[in-house]
Image: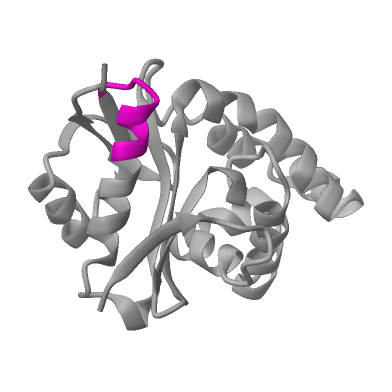
Amino acid sequence: MEIEIVEATPDNPLGGALNYAALNDMSETMLGVSSKEQAIDGLQYLWQQAGNRFSHEYTLVATIESQTAGAITCMPVEKMDHAFYKTFIDIVRYRKLGVILYAIRNFKKMMLLSTMKEGEKGEYHISMLATRPDFRGQGVGSALLEAAEERGQAEGYDSISLTVKKDNDQALNVYESKGYKIVGDIDLEDIQLYRMRKIIAAKP
């Protein structure tokens, strides 16, 4: 089956679910909700907005026979850092008073998530990569990685980075096979990640 990579659109109904597949329960903490369903709903709201780090605006979608098979969100680290403020504003708009009350009770955990240093300035960064379960094993993830690397090259970057959970051996092996190397780690109370980087040749 042929995999087509297209620009994401705000009306894709799977944007929230794909982001949740990549973030899991971290998204519940970030959004201040207590269930997977609420988290997916909140991430779908963020997907539909512009300028935040979970927006369709920075995302490429893989399709197979016109069906969404997976997605990847990628942007320069500087843009991702800048998008934090818009992300916070959009979450407040979504949760209204609820997120304020949650933030008071969970201030330390939310601050850890918001200040987590995922990449270095000068890198192109993959902040989300997810493949739908029924399309795994068909090369979707590899096609999305290649598309993100090509986009980084086209924008003049010579390195691309991502993070992966330390206990996700399968994903770690895949990234290493694609040329990504561990360059650091993130050790927070509930989050243990490797930082990985790959050198890509910038286009002249």
| Residue sticking out furthest to the left | 177
Q: Position of residue 110 (x, y in %)?
A: 63, 40
Please say if 88 is above or below 138. Answer: above
Residue drawn at (52%, 63%) of the image: 20
Q: Quadrant of the C terminus?
A: top left
The answer to whether one can see residue 29 in this image is yes
Left or right: residue 48 versus residue 140 is right
Please say if 68 is above or below 8. Answer: below
> In the picture, residue 87 is in which quadrant?
top right
Residue drawn at (77%, 44%) of the image: 90
Residue drawn at (12%, 54%) of the image: 173
> In the picture, residue 107 is in which quadrant?
top right
Q: Position of residue 36 (x, y in %)?
A: 60, 72
Of 142 and 37, the residue lying toward us:
142
Is residue 157 one of those drawn in magenta?
A: yes
Residue drawn at (28%, 49%) of the image: 145
Q: Quadrant of the N terminus?
A: bottom left
Q: Position of residue 192 (x, y in %)?
A: 34, 44
The answer to whether one can see residue 193 in this image is no
Q: Which residues are magenta?
A: 150-158
Left or right: residue 203 versus residue 18 is left
